[in-house]
Amino acid sequence: MSINNRAADISELLKQQAALMRVGDKLPSVRQLSKTYGASPVTITQAISTLSGLGVVRAEPGRGTFVAGRVESNELPHPEQPFTSSRNHLAEPDYAWQSSTLGRSRVDAVRAGRLHSQSTSGHVQLSWGYLAPELQPFDELRTLGVRCAKSHRAWTMAPPMGLPELRRAFAGQLSAEPEDMLIMPGGQQSLVFAMRTLADPGSTLITESPSYPGAAIAAQSAGLNLAAVQADEHGIIPAKLADALERTHAKLIYLQPCYANPSGAILSPERRVEVLALAKRYGAFIIEDDWARNLSLDGNAPPPLFTQDPDGHVVSIATLTKPAAPGLRVGAIAARGPAGERLRTARIADDMCVPPLTQEIALGLLTSSAWPRHVTRLRAGLLERRDAMVEEIHTSMTGAKVPNIPTGGIHLWVKLPEGSNSTALTTAAHQAGVLIGDGKQYFVDEPPAPFIRLSFSAASIPQIRAGVQRVAGLL
């Protein structure tokens, strides 16, 4: 790193200033010094680094820069000479300039942190929205992985829209055309990509409430504003959706018509018709997050909303990550008309393709006899866990209620006794070795009552019982 003349001059001035101060006195901040000397933060930082290397000052991250000692003027390096110092004398970095340069963060760090919190070996995991290892088709995936890795197709460039056979496999679940499908690296990336491509930054996304926090941070990442519309056990309320569309002029609606996270609600047949009519009236897109289609427990899942929409208002997202394995980051977006064309064109700007090896494994799983066997096993395992969790909540958690026993999905939405603090309970549970979901994170606005979300897919039945009992003790 070479030192320019301006940085060298400021180093000399700062050294003279430090000579008039006591050891341990604090120098002004980088921002203040930039104003004083009319120099950029980078130049100021370089000058301070020079003095730090000479032992004149010491930088303490998060606290500032302090006087450390004395040197003579002729010990400063010549402006034309490179400055070097030993590792032990390197200045601590000062990132203060980044805070002003970056501006306000789009994504809510608290919501994002809670969404992706994982357990340690000592925690009971009642918050993680994925399958426990014993519920994953591990043997099938391992066999497919070895076989697919031997194929040259796994190591060549795949088409940007995805392998034709895999697009066809996903299309079959939606009664769509393969040309309507776009293979994506998982459901979360699909949400961000669809929101960013279909709406301009600064516009509004309408979401049902409560809803998946990952959709909220996806919208934030895309630069969208959020407007929440109340949902109940039958899904989003059409009259309130109409009011929101009229008020916000939003062109994007986020829905989970099938086993909504966190409530498990299914959009009723009557409301499906009304919601599609509203999308048509206001010229809006519906992003259908169909994450739980393969996670039905009692009866069959309703057909995708995509299948009832001939005019391209519905853009549907499917994923293999939830019903197969967390590391199998493969999903698909289905979209018709110019919107589909725009999504498929914009995809190339993100990356050239989903890794072919991952696509080959996903294709092998979906088209093998192992897939229906896995879905059948999974259904039995999740149903047993759901019933055990419901029973334990009714037995142990006095005053708590499960307003809706879901017929699919992996979550229970638990209403706490009046006056409970869901955030305090979530924190206390974490300290007691149980991870649960704070209900506040599932609302854009203030929650109407205290809730927690308990997930039954990532823990064994003994762990579920023990975890619920521990949480009940904290209530």
Image: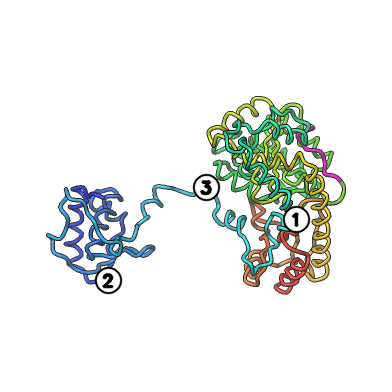
Between 21 and 432, the one lying in front of the other is 432
- The earlier-in-sequence mark between 2 and 3 is 2
Q: Is residue 31 left or right of residue 431?
A: left
| CA gap, disc 1 and disc 2 | 59 Å
User: For the residue marked with disc 3, what is the amino acid?
Assistant: Arg
Disc on res. 24? 2
Structural crowding at the residue carrying mark 3, measured as other residues with C-alpha within 10 Å and reported as few (<14), some (14–19) or many (≥20) = some
Q: CA distance from mark 3 to mark 1?
A: 36 Å
Above or below 428: residue 286:
above
Camera-nearest label, 1 or 2: 1
Where disc 1 sits, the SS reads helix
Whether the magenta-drawn stretch holds residue 304 is answered as: yes
Can you say which quadrant of the picture contains the C terminus? Answer: bottom right
Q: Residue furthest left?
A: 74
Whether residue 163 is visible to the viewer of this picture, yes or no, is yes
Circle 2 packing at 10 Å, graded few (<14), some (14-19), many (20+), is few
Residue found at x 79% / y 71%? 396
Q: Would you say 76 lies left or right of 256 here?
A: left
Residue 188 x, y percent position in the rendering:
63, 45
Q: Amino acid at mark 1?
A: Leu
Indicate yes or no whether the magenta region holds residue 438.
no
Q: Secondary structure at mark 3?
A: loop
Residue ID at (71%, 70%): 471
Residue under circle 1? 135
- Whole-percent x, y for residue 449 in the image: 71, 60
Q: Local crowd at mark 1 within 10 Å, few (<14), some, or many (≥20)?
A: many
Tell me the kind of residue under disc 2.
Gly
> Residue 106: which disc?
3
Q: Position of residue 171 (x, y in %)?
A: 74, 33
Q: Find residue 24 and report its horizontal and vertical position in percent.
A: 27, 71
Whether residue 85 sits left or right of residue 440 in the image: it is left
